[in-house]
Structures are given as C-alpha cells and as structure tokens.
Image (spheres, rainbow, N blue to C red):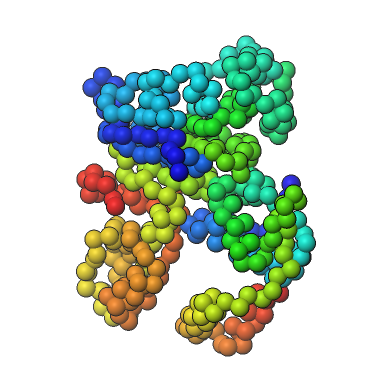
Amino acid sequence: MRLPFSVDIRPGRPLHDQVVFAVTKAVVTGQLAAGDAFPSVRALSQELRINPNTAQKIVGTLIERGLLEPRPGIGTVVAAWQPAANPARRASLASQIDRLAVEARQLGMTLSDLLDAIRRAWK
Amino acid sequence: MDTVIDVTDLTCRYQQVEAVTGISFTVAEGTVFALLGPNGAGKTTTIRALMNIIRPSSGEARVLGVDSRRLGRSELEAIGYVSENQQMPRWMTLADLLAYCRPFYPTWDDTLCRKLVDDFRLPLDQKIGRMSRGMRVKAALVSALAYRPLLLVLDEPFSGLDPVVRDDLIHGMLERAGEERWSVLISSHDLEEVERLVDAVAFLDSGRIVLSEPMTTLQGRFRQVEVTESGPGPALGLEESWIGATQTGRVLRFIDTAYSGPASDDRMAAKFSGARIEVQPMSLRQIFIALVRHRRGQGQESVQ
C-alpha cells in the first residue's frame, strides 16, 4: 500500500514533526481532501519504516489539530478542517517570519526574491 | 508502564576478559529499544545473557519479570529471538522448519505466518541450506514472529544484508505495529536503520553503558554548533556540556550535549556576541560518533 501524501524523512530532525508537517501540507494544499481515508497506525509505521509509538503520536497530533477525525469502525479520515485560531502558534509563526526576513537579507535576497520563493512554497 | 527487560549491574566475564561490565538498563513494555555500539562493545553478550544462553558472572537480568537464569518454557513461548549467527537446520525446507516450530507455540498464527512468507517472497519448498543469507534471516524472522511473541529480540538482524532485504525485514518486523504490549529489543551498529525505529537507545562501548535514554530527549539535547566570529577568534570559554570543540581560524565548532532550545540560543548569542552562530540537529549516527570520540579522548566516564 502507498501513502496518500509524500514525505522525505531526513535524519536528525524529530520524525514526528517531519511527518505531521508533511500531512498538514497535503491537507492545506488539498492533496488530501475531507473524508479521504487516512492510513492506520500500522500502515503508517510499516510504510514509513517508523516506530509504531511515533506513528500513534503523529495520528494523535493530527486529530488534536483538527486535521484528522477518528470514525469508529472505519478508521481515521481527513477532517473538514477549519483554519485554526491559535494565538500561540501565530506568535511563533511571526517570530519565524522575522528570522526568515533577516536570514534572506543576510544572504543578499531582495524582498521580491523572497516573495517569489514563498509563492512557490504556497502552491 | 511495566518493564519487559530489567538489567541491573550485569557483568559477563569470559575467563579473564570482561565482555560486559556492570551495565544497567530497562526496556519498557510497548516500546522498541536499541542496544547500539561498535563491534565488540558487548551487545551480543548482553543479549545472550538475557536469553539464558550464557550465565552472567554477577548482577541480574530480568526478562518478562523472570530472572534470565530461570527462563523457562512459558517465557520462551512469549519471546521471539533472531540472532545474526542463528543455527538453523540446513536440511529442512522452510515448510519443514515452520511445521517443526509450530507445536512449540500455543499462540502460533497460521494466517500471520502465511502472510509473512508471502510478503518476504520465501519459497516454502526450498531447503534452508540452499538459501541466501538474506532469505535465511527472513525465514528466521517468520518463525519468530508467527506466534506473536510479546517480546521480539533481534541481534544484529541487518548486518551483511543488502538494502532491499533490510527494508523487507523492517517492513516485516513492523507487521505488528499498533498492537499494544508488543516490545522489541534490537542490537545493531547500523544507526541509520535504527534511528526511525526506536523509542529509546542504550549506547554500549567497551562493555559499558555510555548512555541510555529516550530518542526524543537524546535528539533534543544534542546540537552541532558552529560559531563564526567576525573579529579575531573568540575567547575560549567553553561550557562543560560542550564537547569535541575545535577551532579553525575564526570558526569554532563544538557539540552541545545539553541544548535546551531558545534558552541555549540566547546564552550562546550572549557569549559569542556579534558572531554568526549555526545550530544544527544531529542524526543518531552523528551523536554516536561524537560520543565515542569524546570518550576515547577523555578516558571512559559517562556523558550525562
């Protein structure tokens, strides 16, 4: 079985965060649509060759963030998600944007270079 | 959470040589635990003591709640053990082997057994002696998984196997992922393979435990740091938790073993004001190499 989202796992960074990010990206970009079946913990673990407890936590986090929804007797499906109103995560994003802007300037990028790069990532 | 393996101050001596010296670690139920270390570190000795193949010289290892020296039939029925140098009856076909193993295990599951044989693309009518090493390890894993053991013990399962076989083995081993009360102890020196699989690791070096902790805290606290000064080289004022420091020109590199996120970033920024500081997370392999180098350079204390 194949997974309905793609993820390129890099060593060194927490697996949980990498996979949660990949699924979130697939959901917000529409690669995964509301009602789509999401793999079981076992399928996730087997396909990604990852620790089962980590796979369990990944599903837990995605449910908690409203991106997945458990359906008793069926499994887990992609939720009809709403944009999250989460001030803490907004604040953290603002500081990441700050760093991004500084890093880009230090690398000699212009604002329009950076905006182009963001536009590409947005798709 | 219950522990499935509890090792306390275990020492194993072969004649004059101490293969393992006073090691302690625990494996929690429902987790995958890796025993890591270079060749000759004592991994196989530890596992053999756990499986009651050798007697510890002192200390104790409890497996599924029982002293390893008293492991009996009821415990062995709940343990699946696959070792690198497994002795297997070469004259038997795989079908013979599975039929031979089956009556020993009340929990033997024919459906699971067939699924594993299919997934591994193993020929049932082939003699074990005529199989490749990879096929033999797969066959051993089938015979160890088919009775759904509570504890799976794998001693260097991947060594000397090609990447596709390794990948198949990991897939097969995760067949029971998601079931509760399923625990795995795996020894390996292949760190890339193990990194994604484990909840916790113990590093063995020269028969001693260097560290034993959950992957999340281990990867959280180790960072590779590179400081590039804009002016002349920084005044060296290294903290105790920074190891393996080297300075090349204006670039100072070290490994922070007690990184704690923004607090650490702020402290480094204050210490090296005006410098460019890059902080990178580390793979299990990088952490392992850094620790072993540090120990070789510093004598043999443990790194906390």
Question: Could you tell whether B128 is left or right of B251 in the image?
Answer: right
* Rendered residue at 24%/49% (across/down): B297
B134 lies above or below B227 = above
* Rendered residue at 55%/37% (across/down): B182
Image location of residue B262, percent across then percent down: 39, 72
Query: Most extreme residue toward the front, as rendered?
Result: A72
Q: Is residue B80 visible?
A: yes
B22 lies above or below B241 = above
Image location of residue A24, percent across then percent down: 65, 66
Image location of residue A108, percent across then percent down: 51, 84
Q: Which quadrant of the structure image shows residue A6?
A: bottom right
Q: Which quadrant of the structure image shows residue A31?
A: bottom right
Question: Could you tell whether B29 is left or right of B114 in the image?
Answer: left
Quadrant where the N terminus of chain B lies? top left
Q: Nearer the viewer, residue A40 or B90?
A: A40
* Rendered residue at 45%/35% (across/down): B4
Q: Nearer the viewer, residue A115 or B75?
A: B75
Image location of residue A117, percent across then percent down: 63, 79
Question: Could you tell whether B255 is left or right of B94 in the image?
Answer: left
* Rendered residue at 54%/38% (across/down): B181
B128 lies above or below B231 = above
Q: Nearer the viewer, residue B10 or A3?
A: B10
Q: Is residue B132 visible?
A: no
Number of dots carrying numbers: 0
Q: Nearer the viewer, residue B193 or A93?
A: A93
